[in-house]
Amino acid sequence: MVISAPSGGGKTVVRSGLLKLDKRFAFSVTCTTRARRPGEVDGRDYYFVTPERFAALRKQGMLLEWAVVHGNYYGTPVRSVMSVLAEGRIPVMTIDVKGARSVKKIFPGAVTVFLLPPDLKTMVQRLRGRGEAPENVAVRLRTARSEIKVASSFDYLVINDKLRETVREVAAIADLETRKTGRNLDKVRAFGTQLSKKKFR
């Protein structure tokens, strides 16, 4: 599951809520060259790497996707996603819209969710509330203009107003997706095999 949003959309807090709510999900940790924010932990929130290390990972083909966002590099290590899939769990990726597009190309079955704050005022309040400098707020608002334009390419849209409700909505999307026939053809075939072997009088 790929969750994208403009800055202030709340993708990080929604992801955290999702992991607490449902054990099926596991966070696919991304790496970044940006500086840590207060309270962030390396290996839990992000893998914080130098630009040189990031370039090496990219050159070695060890990133599933990568992008430059607000002047910093972000990327998803392939091993981070594959280790979650190997556990039979659902990787949750919180990445920008370009990264979401890249993941969808490699994993067509990935489910993409676009989060929106309820209104612009809330978005600005959230940005300021996490300590963004005025000039950074302006940059992120400009970036949001282009991000909004591609929202229609996502599978689902969720308005992130009340956190608890938003988290439950995203979890419900996963429930819906796991019930799609295309994801359960093995069960259909197994039942068909049973029917073909059954002798009816």
Image: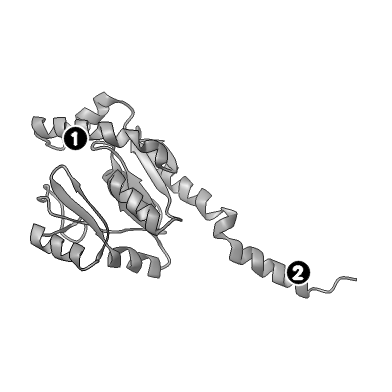
Q: Nearer the viewer, residue 192 or 161?
A: 192
- Which residue bears the numbered disc 2? 195
Crowd class of label 1 (few under 14; some 14 to 19; many from 20; radius 10 Å) = some
Residue type at mark 2: give it: Leu
Q: Element type at marker 2?
A: helix
Crowd class of label 2 (few under 14; some 14 to 19; many from 20; radius 10 Å) = few
Q: Earlier in the sequence, mark 2 or mark 1?
A: 1
Q: Which image quadrant is residue 11 in? A: top left
Residue 84 to residue 35: above or below = below
Q: Nearer the viewer, residue 21 or 110?
A: 110
- Horizontal and vertical percent for residue 86? 39, 70
Side of 171 relative to 134 (left or right) = right
Taking the image as drawn, is residue 20 in sight? no
Q: Nearer the viewer, residue 191 or 69?
A: 69
- Horizontal and vertical percent for residue 32? 16, 54
Side of 178 relative to 123 (left or right) = right
Residue 96 to residue 78: above or below = above
Residue type at mark 1: give it: Arg
Q: Residue at x 25, y 30 (%)?
A: 123
Residues under labels 2 and 1: Cα distance?
57 Å
Side of 23 relative to 142 (left or right) = right
Residue 192 to residue 13: above or below = below
Callout 2–callout 1 Cβ contact below 8 Å: no
- Horizontal and vertical percent for residue 153? 41, 41
- Which residue bears the numbered disc 1? 140
Taking the image as drawn, is residue 82 in sight? yes
- Horizontal and vertical percent for residue 193? 70, 71
Q: Which image quadrant is residue 107 in? A: bottom left
Q: Residue at x 27, y 34 (%)?
A: 146
Q: Element type at marker 1?
A: helix
Q: Nearer the viewer, residue 79 or 20?
A: 79
